Amino acid sequence: MHVNVLMAEAGDCPIAAYQESNGETVYLWQQTFEDGVNDLVMSKTTPERGDAKRVTFGGSRQLGCHYLALAIARGGDWGWHIAWSNEHGVFYARMDGEAWVSSPPKLISSSPAKQLSFEKAEAKLKLSWEPLDPVAPAYAVSNDEGRSW
């Protein structure tokens, strides 16, 4: 089952969204904090509402979009699968909605990607992407809900 919905906002910074079976949507996007750091946040309401939880730390202080692609998917009853791509590659983390479940985030591919998506079937999780380097791998599979790849 394909579970990720991709969106974009003005300025071409990506936003990922996942729609729950009850119709509620969870969003993942880049936000600039008061200290000037750009990190990823997630929210169960629209990005404009301001109730977002910070899910990455130590991001860039430079202006602009620092994430080329984002993806988010429900991780069973324990939380969320989150993936992002930046200039250093494709990264994956599991999050329980409050704090990291896997820390630090895992580098899945050292080649940046311009599109990410999750597919789930029970404990099998496939993260697919469109690599910027045409000879780079285009997907990774975990058979234990993202604990190992």
Image (spheres, rainbow, N blue to C red):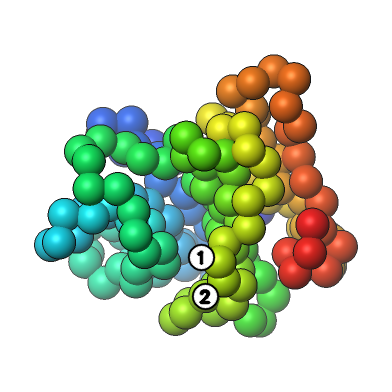
Front position in the image: 121 or 31: 31
Residue at the limit of the structure toward the top, as seen here: 134
Q: Quadrant of the C terminus?
A: bottom right
Q: In the picture shown, does residue 46 fall above or below 132?
A: below
**Callout 2: 10 Å neighbours few (<14), some, many (20+)?**
some
Residue, disc 1:
23
Q: x%, y% of residue 42?
A: 39, 64
Q: Quadrant of residue 14?
A: top left
Q: Is residue 92 left or right of residue 84?
A: right
Left or right position of 55 against 104: left
Name the kind of residue labelled 2 in the image: Trp
Mark 1 or 2, which is nearer the eye? 2
Instruction: Name the residue: 86% across, 62% down.
Output: 143
Q: Which residue is mark 2?
A: 100
Judging from the image, what secondary structure is the residue with disc 2 in? Answer: loop
> Residue sitting at 77 percent across and 50 percent down?
126
**Marks 1 and 2: CB-CB under 8 Å?**
no
